[in-house]
Image (tube, coloured by chain):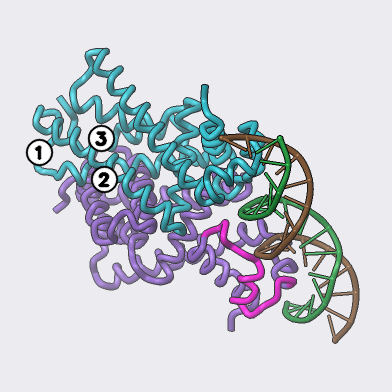
Chain colours: A purple, B cyan, C green, D brown
DNA sequence: GTCTATAGTGAGATAGAC
DNA sequence: GTCTATCTCACTATAGAC
């Protein structure tokens, strides 16, 4: 069974996704988690500490479902580097509760990080890891002849992940439909890697 | 001379750029604008109204400097559609006070719009206009043989502008250097439009 | 680890004079 | 249009019992 600490973090992600970092009320989280405000301060020291822990929690959760998606793709036999890359990127543009929640919260925290050094560092690490992981898949795709040569995998990966973030924010803010966002991303992959097979 | 109302809006942009929408204090803006809080409520009704007006103010300002940059490019004789497209997009990734301020504030308001229907509508209009303008330049570039055929100008424009937003946010949050962000954008243009002439 | 109760305060908003 | 004064309250954070 999930510890109260965990319930609090889950509630925090939910609340951030629902009303943003600014709209996050400690008391509300407590209520949603079936805990008291006192306990939140006991575990996380203060509001900022709670935000930090929440960011870590989101990162972990994202890692987990990414790994899971890749494993599933591998099982389905559809496991070349290029489709793994595509699947992993498209993962962020999906209307699942968990993913929508994660994406929204992630965007919020990213935006907050502009003004908060503490958050910034954590965010930087997570982003760098994501970019590196994607760069590796781009390189693999190149080796397998599934992607145009002559472009730096790091550059492509950085562009595609930044694009995902941009599209994601437009999707979440209702400026862009989900299907269109996914199509655009697929189009970008073609533009960056070439037509593939 | 600028009206007090204008001074308040200028101060608001500055404050948002400095400490985010979350960090925006009505009293602080009043102080910076040399006005009273009462006046702010007189002009803008409430905090949310101030945010709305600020978003409009930023949009206008962005339109102005974009138009100006294009005019300058035209004067310099460097006026083919493709370089206009490139210049206009790169404009958002520039370390000028005004632009940095505008970009930061824009990003903040975009992020806030996820939770604020009112802001959302205004934002949507501004984004759509930007995308449409870029799409037109893509189409012109295609006609002039400066861009690959067979891709929808709207798609390319939507991707490039979303990418600019993504890169901009990484730049502003310190995750990405400015020069690298600009290089990545140039690379994306090449990937989308082809090598040019 | 967890709760209840409460202290403290920051900041949005309003009233009313000029 | 603009200011001063003030009200109010929603939220963070702490103290202390269990």
Q: CA distance from mark 1 to mark 3?
A: 14 Å
Q: Chain of mark 1?
A: B
Q: Secondary structure at mark 2?
A: helix
Q: CA distance from mark 2 to mark 1?
A: 17 Å
Q: Secondary structure at mark 1?
A: loop
Answer with mark 1 or mark 3, whichever residue precedes in sequence: 1
Residue B21 counted in the magenta span:
no
Q: Chain of mark 3?
A: B
Residue A36 counted in the magenta span:
yes
Q: Estimate the x, y position of residue D8 in percent, counting from the top left.
A: 71, 63
Q: Estimate the x, y position of residue B180 in percent, counting from the top left.
A: 41, 32
Residue B68 visible in image? yes
Q: Estimate the x, y position of residue A41 in percent, counting from the top left.
A: 73, 66
Answer with mark 2 or mark 1, whichever residue precedes in sequence: 1
Q: Which residue is mark 3?
A: B189
Q: Which residue is mark 2?
A: B158
For the view shown, which residue lies furthest in the top direction? B76
* Quarter of the figure with residue C15: bottom right
Q: Which residues are magenta?
A: A20-38
Quadrant of image for the C terminus of chain B: top left
Dot 1 crowding, Cα within 10 Å, few <14, some 14–19, many 20+: some
Q: CA distance from mark 2 to mark 3?
A: 12 Å
Which residue corresponds to the image point at 46% horizontal and 59% vertical from the top-left? B115
Disc nearest the viewer among 2 and 1: 2
Q: Foreground residue, B172 or A81?
A: B172
Up/down of D18 relative to A152, above or below: below
Q: Which residue is mark 1?
A: B149
């Amino acid at each position: 069974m999930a510890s109260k600490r965990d319930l609090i973090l889950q509630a925090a992600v939910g609340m951030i996704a629902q009303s943003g970092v600014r709209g996050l009320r400690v008391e509300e989280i407590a209520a949603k988690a079936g805990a008291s405000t006192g306990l939140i301060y006991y575990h996380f020291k203060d509001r900022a500490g709670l935000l930090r822990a929440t960011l870590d929690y989101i990162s972990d959760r994202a890692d987990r479902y990414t790994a899971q998606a890749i494993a599933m793709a591998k099982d389905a036999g559809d496991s070349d580097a290029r489709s793994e890359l595509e699947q992993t990127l498209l993962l962020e543009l999906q209307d699942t509760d968990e993913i929508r929640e994660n994406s929204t919260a992630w965007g919020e925290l990213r935006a907050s990080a502009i003004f908060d050094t503490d958050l910034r560092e954590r965010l930087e690490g997570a982003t760098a890891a994501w970019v590196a992981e994607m760069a590796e898949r781009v390189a693999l795709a190149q080796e397998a002849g599934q992607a145009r040569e002559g472009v730096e995998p790091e550059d492509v990966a950085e562009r595609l992940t930044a694009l995902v973030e941009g599209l994601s924010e437009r999707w979440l803010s209702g400026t862009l439909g989900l299907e269109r966002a996914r199509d655009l991303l697929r189009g970008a992959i073609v533009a960056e890697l070439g037509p593939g097979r």
